[in-house]
Amino acid sequence: MKFHQINLDSWNRKPYFDHYLNQVRCTFSMTANIDLTELLPLLREKKVKLYPAFLYMVTQAVNAHREFRTTYDAEGHLGYWEKMIPSYTFFHQDDQTFSSMWTDFMDDFYLFYENYTADMKMYGDNKGIVAKAMEPPYTFPVSCIPWVSFTGFNLNIFGDGQYLLPIITSGKYFEQEGKTLLPVSLQVHHAVCDGYHASLFMNDLQKWASDGKNWLLVP
């Protein structure tokens, strides 16, 4: 996957990047309810699980805006990946632990669903934090807390404060005023993302959820 290096001297975001990375190091999170009222019946009709559909939608939203793909490469250069793929957690019912998995992404949903299903079949019983080794550098983290319909969620990442990629977490969907809503939390670094960009993500995610009848069509 191609990594595009950013020239800081000509980057129009440089003053914001410097401020929120070096002067007031800052991350923030946003939680919104995504309307799944029309999507869930389609998933049930196609016998498709919600979690891989969610992974597909969030990956499309991430890949639509380079702000969500901006990070450092292995040599410490600032830039952005051409495309990214999801690295997601899944739960082991027998011992209540979780593991992480990455899956190659395809724009065709059913090709991605095949990749997801194959990975879960091959690695889904592996215990430990990492179920599938050799994770490429162009991944972003996604997780799910399906036991609670939260109204806010925040991760506290300790270290040098230079983790720039978005972190996406979904909760338990719930019914409200005739709609089925899924709480989704997005955590970003203010050095590369503002509230505007976080809003773009949530609005894009809603568009994908509302447009399920198109990408869920059988090829």
Image: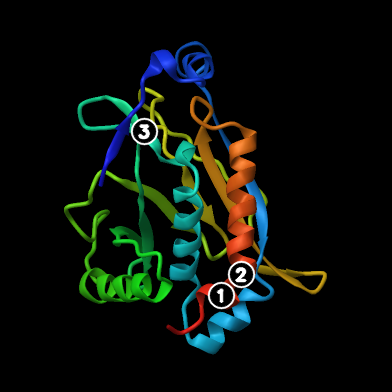
Q: Is residue 133 visible?
A: yes
Residue 149 seen in render: no
Residues under numbered marks 2 and 1 in contact, where contact means CB atoms less than 8 Å apart? yes
Q: Residues within 10 Å of mark 2 (few under 14, many from 20)?
A: few
Q: Mark 2 points at which residue?
A: 211
Q: In which quarter of the image is residue 3?
A: top left
How many C-alpha atoms fall within 10 Å of the one at disc 1: few (<14), some, or many (≥20)? few
> How far across and how far down the image is residue 135, in percent?
22, 51
Q: How far apart are marks 3 and 2 (CA)?
A: 30 Å
For the rendered model, the colour scheme is rainbow
Q: Which residue lies furthest to the left in this view?
A: 134
Are the residues at dot 3 and dot 1 in contact (C-beta closer than 8 Å)?
no
Q: Which of 159 and 215 is in front in this view?
A: 215
Left or right of residue 131: residue 207: right
Relative to 213, say whether 198 is above or below. Answer: above
Q: Which amino acid does label 3 sit on?
A: Thr
Q: Which residue is drawn at 41% across and 25% down?
A: 161
Tell whether 107 sits left or right of 176.
left
Q: What element carries label 1?
A: helix
The circle drawn on residue 74 is none
- Distance from the alpha carbon under mark 3 to that under mark 1: 32 Å
Which of the 4 image quarters holds residue 41?
bottom right
Q: Is residue 68 left or right of residue 212?
A: left
Cα separation, mark 2 vs mark 1, equals: 6 Å
Residue at position x 36%, y 48% from top?
83
- Regarding mark 2 in the picture, which secondary structure is present there? loop
Q: Which residue corresponds to mark 1?
A: 214
The tag earlier along the polypeptide, 3 or 2, is 3
Residue labelled with disc 3: 71
